[in-house]
């Protein structure tokens, strides 16, 4: 499978089915996102002690993080409320679940794998073994934010290319959420063969390193994507702390 590497600020048309690599994420750690992953109330300000811990461990975790991503675009062979078939170089990749409910407006699908790398997770584990639980939780939250930052960088690349293609990205749609089984990870990872930026699947379809995220993004006409809104708007889990709006 041919490779093409790009930097986080580049803008170009993405050839279908060719993996593209994003090796540099320049965005700094989003402190508000770290607090969200910690479950901290949005309207509450951390006290001085917590602010000092956040300052220290965000810096430590950010130094160890290596946010990266790989993504590729695929034509749609078939899409329905409970299925999505993509054209690939080897035939068709078939996904099952409530995909059409969220990506029914898509003209093309982009699959991605993003990760914070293994070192943040290792630091969090070391702190947890020492009994420094709050410190470990902060580091773990930074790892989640760094993986998400790589995911967001992919979406920004897709927004950049929309000036040429006329197709804008939806929010990402990940196995294990919103009615698509975690086992669909297998099909997603097969799209990339061995080009998975160091991320692998366990027998239970969990990702290693743990601070990684994968998913599908639809590309559609701007008016269609806006009309569909956020997948979260159609989800029954109203109290989910990961709920997002389409403006995110």
Image: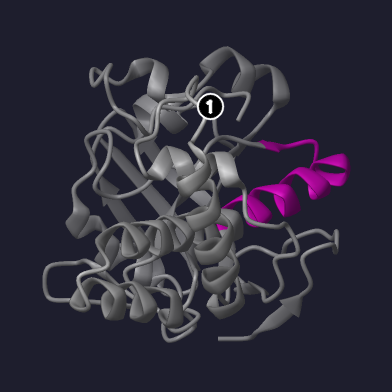
Residue at horizontal 41%, vertical 55%? 141
Give whichever of 25, 47 is nearer the camera.
47
Crowding around mark 1 (Cα neighbors within 10 Å: few <14, some 14 to 19, many 20+) is many
* Viewport quadrant of the C terminus: top right
Q: Which residues are magenta?
A: 151-168
> Is 60 drawn above or below residue 41 in the view shown?
below
Residue at horizontal 33%, vertical 65%? 136
Q: Is residue 44 left or right of residue 184?
A: right
Rendering quarter of residue 32: top right
* Viewport quadrant of the N terminus: bottom right
Name the spot of residue 208 as percent of width and height, x first. Answer: 31, 76
Residue 186 in sight from this viewpoint: yes
Verify whether residue 157 appears in magenta: yes
Give whichever of 109, 140 is nearer the camera.
140
Q: Secondary structure at mark 1?
A: loop
Verify whether residue 54 appears in magenta: no
Residue, far left: 204
Count of all numbered marks drawn on residues in the image:
1
Residue 74 in sight from this viewpoint: no
Name the spot of residue 235 as percent of width and height, x first. Answer: 30, 21
Rendering quarter of residue 72: bottom right
> Is 81 drawn above or below residue 188 in the view shown?
above
Give whichever of 88, 11 is nearer the camera.
11
Q: Main secondary structure of the magenta part?
A: helix
Q: Which residue is mark 1?
A: 105
> Is 141 drawn above or below residue 221 in the view shown?
below
Give whichever of 205, 72 is nearer the camera.
205
Residue at horizontal 61%, vertical 77%? 63
Name the spot of residue 113 as percent of width and height, x first. Answer: 47, 65
């Amino acid at each position: 499978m041919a490779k093409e590497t790009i930097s986080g600020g580049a803008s170009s048309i993405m050839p279908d089915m060719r993996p593209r690599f994003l090796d540099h994420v320049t965005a700094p750690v989003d402190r508000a996102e770290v607090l969200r992953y910690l479950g901290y109330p949005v309207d509450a300000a951390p006290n001085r002690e917590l602010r000092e811990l956040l300052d220290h461990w965000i810096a430590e975790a950010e130094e160890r993080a290596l946010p990266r991503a790989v993504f590729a675009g695929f034509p749609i062979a078939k899409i329905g409320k409970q299925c999505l078939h993509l054209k690939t170089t080897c035939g068709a990749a078939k996904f099952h679940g409530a995909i059409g409910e969220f990506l029914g407006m898509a003209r093309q699908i982009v699959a991605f794998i993003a990760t914070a790398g293994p070192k943040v997770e290792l630091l969090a584990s070391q702190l947890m073994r020492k009994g420094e639980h709050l410190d470990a939780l902060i580091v773990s939250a930074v790892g989640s934010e760094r993986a998400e930052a790589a995911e967001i960088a992919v979406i920004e690349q897709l927004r950049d290319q929309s000036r040429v293609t006329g197709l804008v990205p939806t929010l990402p749609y990940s196995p294990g959420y919103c009615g698509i089984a975690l086992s669909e990870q297998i099909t997603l990872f097969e799209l990339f063969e061995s080009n998975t930026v160091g991320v692998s699947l366990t027998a239970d379809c969990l990702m290693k390193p743990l601070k990684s995220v994968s998913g599908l993004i639809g590309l559609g006409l701007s008016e269609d994507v806006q009309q569909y809104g956020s997948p979260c708007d159609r989800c029954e889990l109203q109290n989910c702390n990961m709920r997002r709006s389409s403006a995110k």
